[in-house]
Image (tube, rainbow, N blue to C red):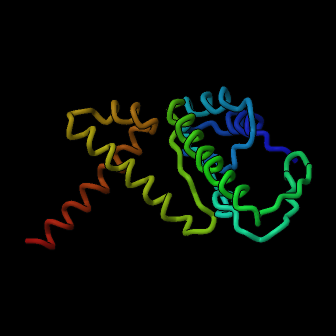
Amino acid sequence: QATDLRHALEFLMRVTKRRTICFVVSDFLDEGFEKALLAANRKHDVIAVLVTDPAELAMPDVGLVALRDAESGETRVVDTGSRSFRETVRPVAAERVKTLERRFRSLGIDFIHVDAGRDVVDPLVRFFRMRERRAMDLTVLGWSQHQIAAELGISQAAVSKILGRVEERVLRELRTTV
């Protein structure tokens, strides 16, 4: 069955009444979902999570392979033993990831790329630490919690929790160094 992100995001908007963090986990091989994504991001903290398989980004040399498109059902035979084929696939796949990241950033949507062949927790931890750093940087610049929440697309309560965790960590570190 084909991916229908627009329909899924519209469902989210109908059933979720309170503001929430929403991870949209997908390969994003879909079209026409941006409007629904933006609408969901106005109400919720939407984070696009692209999951890729290592073989998508660097096709291994395993000879002739029948690839089936899960969405269209089409099957195509490719020669992964062909160096020119692999050298063509690699930059196209890498550019697709970069293009998606730029597309989401331009829409004000946070983006996480998860390589299914590696630890999936690390990118999530890095994302939340990056968000903590952004909140702290804005605090140092004199921004209010309300302004930080609006900038990061999260609630003031979430900003308060982030800043509280950072403060606790700093105090713990100070106690251990004194």
Question: Relative to 152, is 107 on the left or the right?
Answer: right
Residue 61 in the image, given as x and y percentages of width and height: 73, 69
Image height check: is 86 above or below 11? below
| Total number of numbered discs in the rendering | 0
> Closer to the camera, 121 or 88?
88
The residue at 87%/56% (across/down) is 68
Q: Nearer the viewer, residue 152 or 74?
A: 74
Q: Quadrant of residue 78?
A: bottom right
Q: Nearer the viewer, residue 118 or 88?
A: 88
Judge whether 86 appears above or below 44 on screen: below
Horizontal placement of 49 versus 145: left or right?
A: right
Apparent side of residue 63 relative to residue 136 in the rendered image (left or right): right
Quadrant of residue 136 in the image?
Answer: top left
Compared with 113, 41 (above or below) is above
Name the residue: 26% across, 62% down: 169
Whole-percent x, y for residue 174 in the image: 14, 65
